[in-house]
Amino acid sequence: MRLVIARCSIDYAGRLSTHLPSAVRLLIVKADGSVLVHADGGGYKPLNWMSAPCTLVEEPGDGQRALLWRVANRTGESMTITVEEILHDSDHDLGLDPGLVKDGVEKHLQELLAERCHVLGDGFTLVRREYQTDIGPVDLLCRDGEGGYVAVEIKRRGEIDGVEQLSRYLQRLGSSLGGVRGVFAALAFRPQAKVLAADREIVCVQLDYDALRGMEPLNPRLF
Amino acid sequence: MRLVIARCSIDYAGRLSTHLPSAVRLLIVKADGSVLVHADGGGYKPLNWMSAPCTLVEEPGDGQRALLWRVANRTGESMTITVEEILHDSDHDLGLDPGLVKDGVEKHLQELLAERCHVLGDGFTLVRREYQTDIGPVDLLCRDGEGGYVAVEIKRRGEIDGVEQLSRYLQRLGSSLGGVRGVFAALAFRPQAKVLAADREIVCVQLDYDALRGMEPLNPRLF
DNA sequence: CCATAAATGTCGATT
DNA sequence: AATCGACGTTTATGG
């Protein structure tokens, strides 16, 4: 990894066109060839970047003209860094990163609810996780206390997209299973998602992550 | 901006929990207090980060114990960096960045089409750009050759979300304007978006950006 | 490779 | 603060 602090201006042309006027910035050249341009603030997103695979060609400055870094990829995107002054330049051997271990996302919620689907409604029992339809898998397919089918969509955050997604599943399943209710389960809901769900007769169930984890599974695997 | 190359392990707890085993990484501390952790590859997204506003407290190591960086924000998210070995540590004064100048996105398409809406259909004339409804603005409201209303949704990429969005507008407008057709305009379409649009009797119009720009406006402003 | 859905999404505008 | 839509979304995952 090469770290350069430089006064530079930058032009990007690709999915859109951007220009960065001259200023002092951090330029990162990673081992895989990718280039990041960071300012001294403004979140984790670089001002400009080019992801690997890409090529970096340095055109040396001749005293008069500034140094040019031409970064490009195969799809025709290009980033040109006009380097006017280099204030720092260092190289570092980092080695491979073992990578990030994540915990606690939507899949985990699905696992927990699959074995505790009674929290979604009285007498609910699980038919299948990831019930396949030709427009994608339904998170959970259950039966309610009266034996009717229920399609369950699970999200960390309940937003309008989730209601639309579940609506499509319900329309799709309704014809094959003969009437399916919808339950939208999430840790938190946007108000508009609740409104749309109510409009579509979809029940919203707010989940409590800690309570779910502390709860004994009621549909235990018997082996 | 402080740049540190260090062997470290990192734990984040907040919207989810993550752990990074010990490895050599780049730690960036920006002037606004934000902290980024980068590996030597893998796109522009840091392995871990904490955006401003946040606080960084360094607990000095006592020879035995490693140095601890505790980064936290007001919403209770925390990132703990266990610094085992510092290989590089430098500080740089970058100053304020003048910021990015962007050009050429969806808004530009909307501007072009507003004055060339005949490319969307025979005899189309513009009623209004950003026609307001209580669920959001319709990109373009037009009339077709027979005087019927047409709601136009414009995207760079035509995907299923755009069809859903336009569908909501059509349902909303249908009651007030008495029957509105839908046109979905984009530079490119996903196959499934086309299928869903056809299902909803929405016409998909594929745009040619270069051709649009080269075309004379047919609804010129008369001043 | 295309397609979909998730993301610590982020970011900006607007209410 | 909440919400909505765009993003050079990026990223992971499955066909």
Image (cartoon, coloured by chain):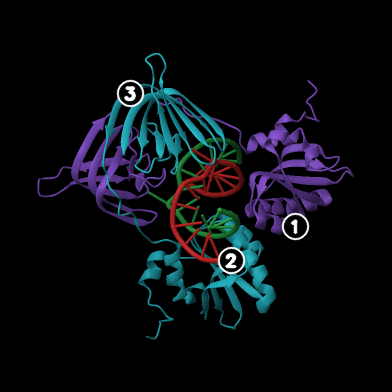
Chain colours: A cyan, B purple, C green, D red
Give the farthest residue toward the bottom. Answer: A222
Give the farthest residue toward the left. Answer: B63
Foreground mark, 1 or 3, reads 3
Label 3 lies in what chain? A
Are the two marked residues, 3 and 2, in contact with CB atoms closer than 8 angstroms? no
Residue type (three-letter) at the residue carrying disc 1: Ala
Secondary structure, mark 2, is: strand
Q: Crowding near pointer 3: few (<14 within 10 Å), some, many (20+)? A: some
Q: Is residue B172 left or right of residue B94?
A: right
* Residue that label 1 marks: B198
Residue A64: give x, y in percent of width and height.
Answer: 40, 13
Foreground mark, 3 or 2, reads 3
Q: Is residue B67 left or right of residue A8?
A: left
Q: Earlier in the sequence, mark 3 or mark 2?
A: 3
If the image is split into quadrants, where does the N terminus of chain B sit? top left
* Above or below B32: residue A152: below
Give the farthest residue toward the top. Answer: A64
* Residue that label 3 marks: A86
* Residue that label 2 marks: A136
Label 1 lies in what chain? B
Secondary structure, mark 3, is: strand
